[in-house]
Image (tube, rainbow, N blue to C red):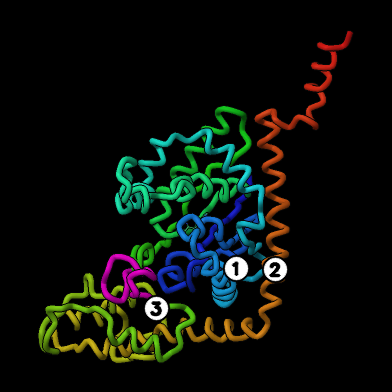
């Protein structure tokens, strides 16, 4: 069995540095290594609608933003099939069959679903709870996510660690399907970034996660002035009041971001007084190193990563119809693969009535006078 790589993002906003270090950067590396049979990256618009039913316009506007972010990071449509989830209708048929193999109780234990239920309340007798209750589509989206993965017999899903419970649930569905009907589907594995800090990049305010709703994101498409402003306002060590004071690097965003973004050569290019990040951290811990100096270095490092991405984005922005064409072609190619898997599923479930010549012959013999 070959290696099939697949991953996706919800089109609810432009992609940010958390997406970049958590998965995007990895995808481009994987693409360029070429060690796979096929690679898919998709825009999960159906999943985005599970908690944005009242705002399809937001989803509609963000398809192109996510596509531009993909292309600007270096995903190459010649090597990777880039598609839109809703343009692969087979996924929804699969979701329906999978939903018969998953219990309500199991979904309630999925950490993402569980957290959302706690947030919205789910006392069915309480009118207010009901009004802001959890949409069924959101409740079952782990099942639909399993279909996204299984439709392509994906083996490898590059994602941040927040997706691990979804992968676990997907593997259970695969085992259940294969055990019930026959060995059609493949159990996927998550591929986490090897660098720990990249698995969940904190927001610029030091909160656990970069998230649009918290307003603590640096976007891939931010201009240099915005990046500079956001880094200058970044959370550091609140105990580091004067330059002479010893400082903490743990939980200090500037150092976390340097851990995530620094590459060989950055010190030589931008701050030759230090040989590497360890030396810089030592100095900061000892005291005598100001936050602003470190922030200025981080701004240069980020600019070195984001500059080429921004440039590529600008080029693609000049030909939006061509980007939609990439998505259309990718969606058609993805639907072909998904149709093949769906066919095999129906065959295993023995609901491929018209192709099942033995079924027709048996029943014909039974009823023939
Ligand atoms: N749940 C993912 C997110 O919120 C998006 C997603 C949908 C996904 N289907 C997927 C990721 C399949 C990996 C594989 O970012």
Q: Which mark is residue 32?
A: 1
Q: Which label is found at residue 78?
A: 2
Say which of 22 and 336 sits in front: 336
Q: Which of marks 3 and 1 is in front?
A: 3
Task: Determine if the magenta segment contains residue 211.
Answer: yes
Disc 3: residue Cβ within 8 A of ligand 1's nearest atom: no
On the image, the x and y values in percent for residue 114 come to 34, 47
Crowding near pointer 2: few (<14 within 10 Å), some, many (20+)? few
Give yes or no for residue 82 being in the magenta stretch. no
Picture coordinates of residue 351, whole percent (x, y): 70, 30
In the image: residue 119, left or right of residue 166: left
Q: Which of marks 3 and 1 is nearer the N terminus?
A: 1
Instruction: Name the residue furthest right.
Output: 369
- The answer to whether one can see residue 26 in this image is no
Residue at 26 percent across and 90 percent down: it is 293
Residue 350's x, y, as percent? 69, 28
Q: Which span is picked out in magenta?
A: 202-217
Q: Which mark is residue 119?
A: none
What is the quadrant of residue 319 in the picture?
bottom right
């Amino acid at each position: 069995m070959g290696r099939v790589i697949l991953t996706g993002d919800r089109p609810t906003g432009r992609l940010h540095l958390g997406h970049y270090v958590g998965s995007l950067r990895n995808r481009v590396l994987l693409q360029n290594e070429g060690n796979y049979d096929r690679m898919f990256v998709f825009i999960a618009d159906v999943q985005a609608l599970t908690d944005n039913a009242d705002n399809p316009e937001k989803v509609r506007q963000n398809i192109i933003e996510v596509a531009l972010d993909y292309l600007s990071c270096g995903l190459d449509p010649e090597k990777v099939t880039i598609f839109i989830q809703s343009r692969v209708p087979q996924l929804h048929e699969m979701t329906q069959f999978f939903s018969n193999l998953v219990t309500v109780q199991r979904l309630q234990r999925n950490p993402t679903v569980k957290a959302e239920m706690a947030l919205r309340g789910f006392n069915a007798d309480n009118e207010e709870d009901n009004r802001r209750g959890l949409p069924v589509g959101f409740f079952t989206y782990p099942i639909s996510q399993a279909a996204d993965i299984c439709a392509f017999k994906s083996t490898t899903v590059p994602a941040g660690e927040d997706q691990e419970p979804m992968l676990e649930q997907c593997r259970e569905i695969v085992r259940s399907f294969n055990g019930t009907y026959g060995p059609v589907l493949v159990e996927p594995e998550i591929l986490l970034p090897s660098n720990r800090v990249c698995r969940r990049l904190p927001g610029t305010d030091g909160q656990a996660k970069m998230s649009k709703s918290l307003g603590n994101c640096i976007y891939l498409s931010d201009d240099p002035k915005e990046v500079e402003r956001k880094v200058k306002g970044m959370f550091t060590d609140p105990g580091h009041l004067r330059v002479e004071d010893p400082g903490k690097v743990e939980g200090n965003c500037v150092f976390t971001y340097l851990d995530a973004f620094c590459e060989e050569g950055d010190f030589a290019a931008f701050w030759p007084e230090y040989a590497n990040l360890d030396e810089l951290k030592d100095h900061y811990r000892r005291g005598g190193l100001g936050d602003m100096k470190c922030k200025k270095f981080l701004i240069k490092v980020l600019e070195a990563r984001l500059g080429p991405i921004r440039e590529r984005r600008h080029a693609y922005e000049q030909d939006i119809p061509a980007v939609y064409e990439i998505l259309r072609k990718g969606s058609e190619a993805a639907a072909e693969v998904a149709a093949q898997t769906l066919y095999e599923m129906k065959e295993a479930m023995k609901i491929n009535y018209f192709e099942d010549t033995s079924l027709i012959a048996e029943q014909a013999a039974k009823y023939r006078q």
